[in-house]
Image (cartoon, grey):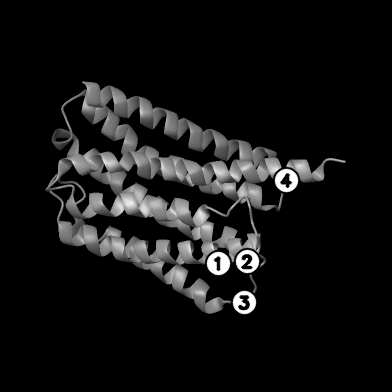
């Protein structure tokens, strides 16, 4: 009961925050600017996670996780795809923020990793509808995802430092932390269930990313004041 209550409250605040901030940034951001794109990214984040977190909350309050394996699996599949899209959008935010021209090879790599990740997630061998999902495919489908994360970390670390970007100077760190907390869960949570708690700081790292978008909006408005 305590776990169900704590997770439900935490997830409700997280989803409400991500989606509300996303809508706000889309509505308040100047058309054609970076801010609405950040809003779309936040909604993709929150909306995608809702497909997994809402069924999980229902499962915790009803028959348990194993009894709701199918709903949880479908939600996890959708979340896996939307998180991939999240990083692809973040890549384009990086390009626009630092006025990156060319680098078609890098864009090709990001799109290839995105499509590969989605294709791996779609394989029936993932057994999304079952509670005992195979570790092998959990690892395989996360390889392109992890590579995308590493690329994003390096890109933001280099360009934010070069541009002395105070708003996004820790974007690389937020992304790095999200993966640092996420990967142990993928690899070892079946054997060490307590590692599932790492999903809380992982989620907070994404909250930090969304908060940077809100900070960018505020900075933009301050700079436009007469």
Ranked by sequence position, the earlier of labels 4 and 2 is: 2
Q: Is residue 223 above or below residue 68?
A: below
Pointer 3 residue: 102
Pointer 4 residue: 220
Front label number (4 vs 2): 2
**In the rendering, which numbered label is found on residue 158?**
1
Q: Who is closer to the viewer here, 117 or 181?
A: 181
- The reply to whether the C-beta atoms of the residues labelled 3 and 4 are less than 8 Å apart is no
Q: Residue furthest bottom?
A: 105
Ranked by sequence position, the earlier of labels 3 and 4 is: 3
Near mark 3 (Cα within 10 A), the count class, few <14, some 14-19 or many ≥20, is: few
Front label number (3 vs 4): 4
Ranked by sequence position, the earlier of labels 4 and 1 is: 1
Q: Residue at 49%, 43% (x, y): give it.
A: 208
Separation (CA) of disc 3 from disc 1: 17 Å
Ranked by sequence position, the earlier of labels 3 and 2 is: 3
**In the rendering, which numbered label is found on residue 162?**
2
Secondary structure at badge 4 equals helix
Q: Quadrant of the N terminus?
A: top left
Separation (CA) of disc 4 from disc 2: 20 Å
């Amino acid at each position: 009961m305590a776990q169900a209550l704590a997770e439900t409250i935490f997830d409700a605040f997280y989803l409400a925050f991500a989606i509300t901030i996303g809508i706000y940034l889309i509505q308040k951001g100047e058309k054609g600017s970076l801010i609405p794109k950040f809003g779309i990214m936040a909604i993709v984040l929150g909306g995608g996670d809702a497909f997994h977190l809402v069924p999980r909350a229902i499962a915790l309050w009803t028959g348990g996780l194993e009894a709701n394996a199918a709903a949880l699996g479908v939600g996890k599949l959708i979340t896996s795809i939307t998180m991939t899209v999240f990083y692809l959008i973040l890549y384009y935010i990086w390009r626009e923020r630092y006025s990156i021209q060319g680098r078609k090879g890098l864009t090709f790599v990001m799109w290839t990793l995105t499509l590969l990740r989605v294709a791996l997630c779609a394989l029936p061998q993932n057994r999304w509808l079952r509670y005992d999902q195979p570790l092998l495919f959990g690892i395989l489908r996360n390889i392109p995802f992890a590579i995308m994360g590493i690329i994003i970390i390096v890109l933001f670390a280099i360009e934010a430092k070069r541009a002395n970007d105070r708003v996004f100077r820790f974007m690389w760190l937020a992304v790095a932390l999200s993966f640092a907390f996420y990967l142990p869960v993928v690899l070892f949570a079946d054997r060490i269930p307590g590692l599932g708690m790492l999903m809380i700081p992982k989620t907070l790292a994404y909250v930090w990313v969304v908060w940077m978008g809100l900070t960018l909006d505020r900075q933009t408005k301050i700079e436009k004041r007469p």
